[in-house]
């Protein structure tokens, strides 16, 4: 699952549910003039 690095609420929720970051792709998109990364997360059991 991937989420943009500027989506703090989603990242917080996923971490709360047990997801962990396993990969980060730098400067994938430009949103509102800001370069953002894609953070890939997977559920940690």
Image (cartoon, rainbow, N blue to C red):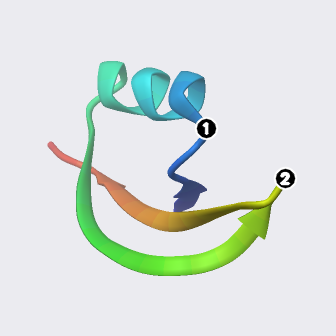
Describe residue 43's horizontal placement relative to residue 29 as left or right. Answer: left
Q: Residue furthest left?
A: 45
Q: Secondary structure at mark 1?
A: loop
Is disc 2 surrounded by few (<14), some (14 to 19) or many (20+) residues within 10 Å?
few
Q: Quadrant of residue 21?
A: bottom left
Is disc 1 surrounded by few (<14), some (14 to 19) or many (20+) residues within 10 Å?
few
Position of residue 13 relative to residue 45, above or below, is above
Q: Secondary structure at mark 2?
A: loop
Residue that label 2 marks: 32
Front: mark 2 or 1: 2
Q: Position of residue 26 (x, y in %)?
A: 42, 78
Q: Residue furthest front?
A: 33
Closer to the chain start, of discs 2 and 1, is 1
Write the residue at 57% across / 22% down.
Answer: 9
Write the residue at 52% across / 62% down.
Answer: 1
Residue that label 1 marks: 7
Write the residue at 58% across / 63% down.
Answer: 36
Q: Quadrant of residue 41?
A: bottom left
Between residue 35 and residue 40, name the one nearer to us: 35
């Amino acid at each position: 699952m991937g989420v943009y690095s500027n989506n703090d609420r989603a990242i917080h929720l996923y971490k709360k549910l047990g997801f962990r970051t396993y990969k980060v792709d730098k400067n994938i998109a430009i949103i509102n003039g800001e370069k953002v990364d894609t953070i890939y997360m997977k559920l940690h059991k």
